[in-house]
Amino acid sequence: MYKALYRKYRPRCFSDVTGQEHVTDTLRRQIEHGRLSHAYLFVGTRGTGKTTCAKILARAVNCQAPEGGEPCNKCASCVGIESGGILDVLELDAASNNGVDNVRALREEALPESLAGFRLLPAELGDQIGDYAAVAIGISS
């Protein structure tokens, strides 16, 4: 089966990400010290590693055996998140799911309890989420 290059060669830990040391070092230290924020905003031009860093962060905060702020990529949480089998990390395409009804449907479909530990909703093109949808998802007031 064909796999796009950015998926085939996507870094699996923060130390593999190049050119974003200021981001990866900060995230790694926050995970090591247990000082996570309630939300993270990854901003930049196409191809700078926003989604990659978000996916690594998702695995690292849910990892059962993190190593120096990095995900182990071996435990059930890491494997499940990477394969898409754990619904605690649900990638949202905000360009096509930008209305209040879309957000309400997402919240209704979400599991009541987190299976891995933290629930993460990386939103691609988050700037296209409507004002009312942002309030419904809890990222604006």
Image (cartoon, helix red, strand yellow):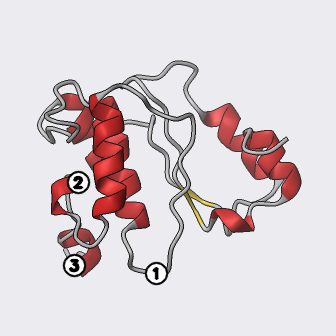
Circle 1 Cα neighbour tier, 10 Å, few/some/many (<14 / 14–19 / ≥20) = few
Please tell me in which quadrant of the rendered image residue 17 appears.
bottom left
Residue 130 relative to residue 10: left or right: right
Question: Who comes first in sequence, dot 3 or dot 1?
Answer: 3
Residue 35 x/y as whole percent: 42, 28
Q: Say the numbered circle drawn on residue 11.
A: none
Answer above or below: position of 83 versus 76.
below
User: Which residue is pictured at 81% across the width and 57% down the height?
Assistant: 99
Distance CA(mark 2)–CA(mark 1): 19 Å
Amino acid type of the residue tagged 3 in the rendering: Tyr
User: Which residue is pictured at 36% across the width and 57% down the height?
Assistant: 23
Q: Name the residue under label 1.
A: 46
Depth check, mark 3 against mark 1: the one in front is 1
Q: Which residue lies furthest to the top in this view?
A: 113
Depth check, mark 2 against mark 1: the one in front is 2
Q: Mark 3 points at which residue?
A: 2
Q: Name the residue under label 2.
A: 14
